[in-house]
Amino acid sequence: MVLTRRRFLKSSAVAATSLALAACVPAEPSVDMPVGTGSDAEMTEITYLIRSDIGVKIQEWTDEAIADFATVEPNIAIETIGVPWGDYNAKLLAQYAAGDPPEISANYAAGFPTFYANDAIVALDELVSENNVDLSVIEQAALDAVTRNGKLWALPLAHLPTIVYYNLDALEEAGATVPPIDWADTSWTTDAMLASANAAAKDMDDPTKAQYGMIFGNGQLGVFEWLWGADPFNDVGGPEHTEAYKTGIVTESFYDSETMNTFIGWVYDAIYGGSPVSPRPSDTDAIQQLVGWPMMSGRIGMAINGAWSVTNFAAVEPSWRWGVGAFPYGPAGVNTSPLFNDSWMLGKGAKEQDAGFRFLQYLAVEKGAELYAQITGFFPAHKENYPIYFDSLMNIPNFALSREDAETALLDAFNYGYVTPGKTLDSYPEWNRTFNQTMGPIWNAEVSVADGLAQVQAQFESVIESKS
Amino acid sequence: MSGMAAVGAGGAERPRLSLRWREAINFYLFLAPWILGFLAFTAIPIIASLFLGFTKYNAISPPDFVGLKNFRFLYDDQIFWKSLRVTLTYTVVFVPLQLVSSLLLAMLLNLRVPSMRTIRTIYYLPSILPTVVTGLVWIWLFNADFGLINFFLYKAFEIRGPNWLGSERWVMSAVIISGLWALGGGVIIFLAALQNVPGEFYEAAELDGANILHRFWHVTVPMISPVILYNLMIAMILSLQVFTRIYVLTQGGPNYASYFYNLYVYDNAFSYLKLGLASAQAWILFVLILLLTVLALRTSGRWVHYSGGV
């Protein structure tokens, strides 16, 4: 055939069109092909949405777990899709919208309550029973956190209390009280912590030199109010009285309560009072930009945060000695620590439910959970893997506690904890945005605590009304 | 040539396509990739979003038709009005400032001085830097205690600078200042327009005794007025759609003082799982932009001068 100009142009156009169409077709999944046998058997492919922004450790764990899983189940191939925390929801939604939800995803961002409320995840009880999965190896409180209406909706891999981190060198140098490991020690109160912070704080007039006593914070949606014996979503008492934590649906809020005023006023005074011990938000932002979590700057005596922050110490390897201690008792005589969990869910409508659950089982109760405890630095929900976690914790430089003390400080926390709202409320990102936006004027000292909290309450009421 | 003519069954000559038809087929074949891309990634999503605007849709369950409920909800929603007010305030202040600054900068860059090409490149650099990176730099610059801006204010004037990003009163100023930094795109277009103004117009004006301000007002401005209109419309559209810089700088805070419209659209769509509501919002913004663009075009007859009187 003679290649005329017309033929060439037509062929080029057809080829270009084909290329454009091919570009619109979903790419072949980058399946992590299993090693080992089973090449003759039919392969089942499942999709696993992972979070890619928490350092190399999660990725490293994922890679190792998938490689090992391939030796256990050579006929199940895993396609991983990595997205950072901020995009996790959007990606997950896009997959649902396309009718192709991933078999396995985690309860980041919107969390399991939102996906539960939207009927987007599978109840696991039948699959657990059919596959004889022994859930007794998982911390019961972690399982309770993902149970609704008597059914289990996810399998927890990490279970993380809120604890006090401290810079032992700074506290010792100032002669300040060091947070105890004993959660039953009622002498460790918010006032004792403030006194210790006062002792440790110096040069507070000069942000470039200041050594801050503590960063206390407010907890998710202000739940450190629990220490003052109240909760933002009931007017009776602590979190155990809040119906919204059981149903996921917020129907009332009490941000302008006297207790909330007292609690926020206490934290406010720690920043702006006559004897400040905490950095102002602009100082925190500046330190955060330099070192990530401000505690790692070495300029903070104590900081309250979830147990995941141990990974910061592993990454930074500070030159100063550090430790972890119990949450302080508040004026109400309780030291309720907000509990977090990272749990993995099986997507409703995902094509390969059985293979998906098999992988979930592997991650939560088999070798995957072991690798998780060993590699990620997140406190495992799998009780038998606690020793592995503590082995890795003891390897972090300048950790000042003995292994026994570390076990007490972290494990006892679960006896004093309650699941944090981010893991119980439907539409948590919306509540979180509402809270953070409206609290801004208070933390930046633009309004009084009372006026600011009245605004917070008004905004919550407005959102509650819009949802009713 | 005879060999080229196809002979059909029964010996009848197959009718050949006319040149016009063949050209049309070739035209559409070549255009097909772009038409398909436009349909798949622009036209169909736009139409779909119009439909979704009348539904309750969370991407997980199928859309549920709710009529005008989303629009009624937005009408009663304080945050919707606040985000609209924030965005319009920004546009009203920022667009004139940007136009004037771009034009002045373009005039400076139009001077004949040594190394002008290098200077022009330097001024254009901010426009090609990633917004996220420049946003992080601005966070540093605006920091109340460590930022260079407050440091300068204190050293030069002994003024204690405000908490730029943490104050409801000051955050909009900070956002506008950070936006004015990247003027490169508008400057380049103004510069091209300025270089196309014939030199003899200035010479004639000078002979008539026009000073530099007269020359600017009676020669430069009319001659580049179509470009001013173009830059005005582009700046207006981009200001109403601003997102990334705000997302990095303030996340819309404090207390929604910098909660721009598109930030609320994004939150509704991807954080709150209200894609139907977000679609309705997107269409309201579309209509708003359309109205403002039409208004700008309609009024342009009074001040835009096209060469040849067109």
Image: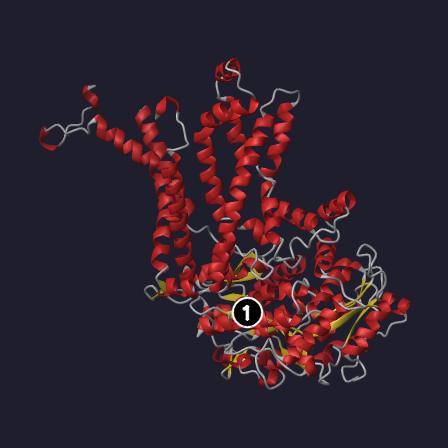
Residue matched to label 1:
A431
For the N terminus of chain B, the image quarter is: top left
What colour scheme was applied to this rendering of the protein?
secondary structure
Query: Quick one: B190 or A55, which is closer to the camera?
Result: B190
Left or right: where B261 falls relative to B22: right
Image quadrant occupied by the C terminus of chain B: top left
Q: Position of residue A128 (x, y in %)?
A: 52, 79
Instruction: Give residue A170's position: percent from left, percent from top.
Output: 86, 65
Choose top left, top right, bottom left or bottom right for residue A120.
bottom left
Residue closest to the eye, A447 or A384 = A447
Left or right side of B44 for A337: right
Q: Is residue A395 rendered to the left or right of residue A24?
A: right
What is the chain letter for disc 1? A
Residue A207 picture location, percent across and down: 79, 56
- The reply to whether residue B99 is visible in this rendering is yes
Label 1 CA crowd tier, 10 Å (few <14, some 14–19, many 20+): many
Q: Is residue B109 above or below residue B92?
A: above
Residue type, label 1: Trp
Above or below: residue A85 compared with residue B304 = below
Q: Is mark 1 on a helix, strand or loop?
A: helix
Which residue is located at x 50 percent, y 47 percent? B91
Q: In this view, does B140 lie to the left or right of A116?
A: right
Q: Give the vertical position of B177 relative to A215 (above or below).
A: above
